[in-house]
């Protein structure tokens, strides 16, 4: 930190790029609030894409720092825990007898991220344990689609069961499939972003009335 700087923070270009994930997560939350679920899922995937690309920006700008690591944990909590939780709240979890599942989901997410951030050495040992947080966005996308197939409250209670199970899977002492930052995964995420944005644009069309 420079003594003559206005702020005590020192933000690198890679940090600024990572912080755009916060912006898109907040946009997703806003769309969930207005029950524009297609756009909410699309922007969750945008935040995921930014999180995938972040390591490349760190390498390009050679700005790997402890600050960036801690900030990344907060960004992942917002993108993979808060945004999906808000989505499911407006999806039907606002009912008193199931809203507590979202609190459990958040608590397990915090616990998982806290273990990751204890130290670089310890995090390296546990990174592959437990269900990765990014699966929460895929769960949201899947249940958005299932809502057109399973009518009524059944889809909400099924989602509650899945989120309840996912909460414990996140802290399970077992290895899980991890998200690989490779071209194939980028293609999948960009494809899903395009799909859900297209669904948001065409929500009033006849395909939603079938």
Image: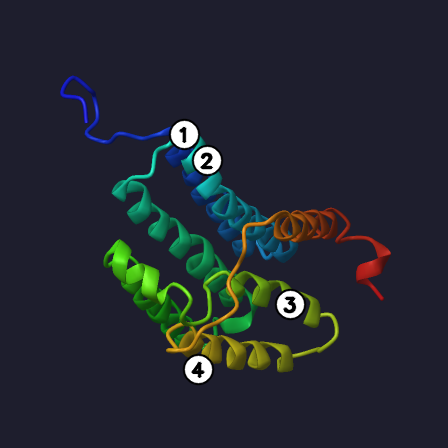
**Residue tagged 3:** 142
Instruction: Work out which residue is located at the far top of the displayed protein and give it.
Output: 4
Element under disc 4: loop
Label 3 – label 2 distance at C-alpha: 30 Å
* Position above or below: 168 against 136: below
Left-right relation of 68 to 186:
left
The spot of residue 28 in percent (x, y) is 53, 50
Q: Secondary structure at mark 3?
A: helix
Q: Which numbered disc flags the more N-terminal residue, 2 or 4?
A: 2
Residue 135 place in picture, x, y as percent: 53, 65
Q: Is residue 27 visible?
A: no
The mark that comes first in sequence, 4 or 3, is 4
Question: In the image, which disc is placed on residue 97?
Answer: 4
Name the residue carrying label 1.
61
The alpha-carbon separation of the residues under discs 1 and 4 comes to: 48 Å
* In this view, the mark in front (4 or 3): 3
Q: Of tags 2 and 4, which is closer to the observer?
A: 2
The answer to the question of whether label 2 and label 1 lie on touching residues, with beta carbons closer than 8 A, is yes
Instruction: Residue at 59%, 63% (x, y): give it.
Output: 138
Dot 1 or dot 3, earlier in sequence: 1
For label 2, the SS is helix
**Residue indicated by mark 2:** 57
Q: Residues within 10 Å of mark 3 (few under 14, many from 20)?
A: few
User: In front: mark 1 or mark 3?
Assistant: 1
Could you give the CA–CA distance between mark 2 and mark 4, rounded to whole angstroms?
43 Å
């Amino acid at each position: 930190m420079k003594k003559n700087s206005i702020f005590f923070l020192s933000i690198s270009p890679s940090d600024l790029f990572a912080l755009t994930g916060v912006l898109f997560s907040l946009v997703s939350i806003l769309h969930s609030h207005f029950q524009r679920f297609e756009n909410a899922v699309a922007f969750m995937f945008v935040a995921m894409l930014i999180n995938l690309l972040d390591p490349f920006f760190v390498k390009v700008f050679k700005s790997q720092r402890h600050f960036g690591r801690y900030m990344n944990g907060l960004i992942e909590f917002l993108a993979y825990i808060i945004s999906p939780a808000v989505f499911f709240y407006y999806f039907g979890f606002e009912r008193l007898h199931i809203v507590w599942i979202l609190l459990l989901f958040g608590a397990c997410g915090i616990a998982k991220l806290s273990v990751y951030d204890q130290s670089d050495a310890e995090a390296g040992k546990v990174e592959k344990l437990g269900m990765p947080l990014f699966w929460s966005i895929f769960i949201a996308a899947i249940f958005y689609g299932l809502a057109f197939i399973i009518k009524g409250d059944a889809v909400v209670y099924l989602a509650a069961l899945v989120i309840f199970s996912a909460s414990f899977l996140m802290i399970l002492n077992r290895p899980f499939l991890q998200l690989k930052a490779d071209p194939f995964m980028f293609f999948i995420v960009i494809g899903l972003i395009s799909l859900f944005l297209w669904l948001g644009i065409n929500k009033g069309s006849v395909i939603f009335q079938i």
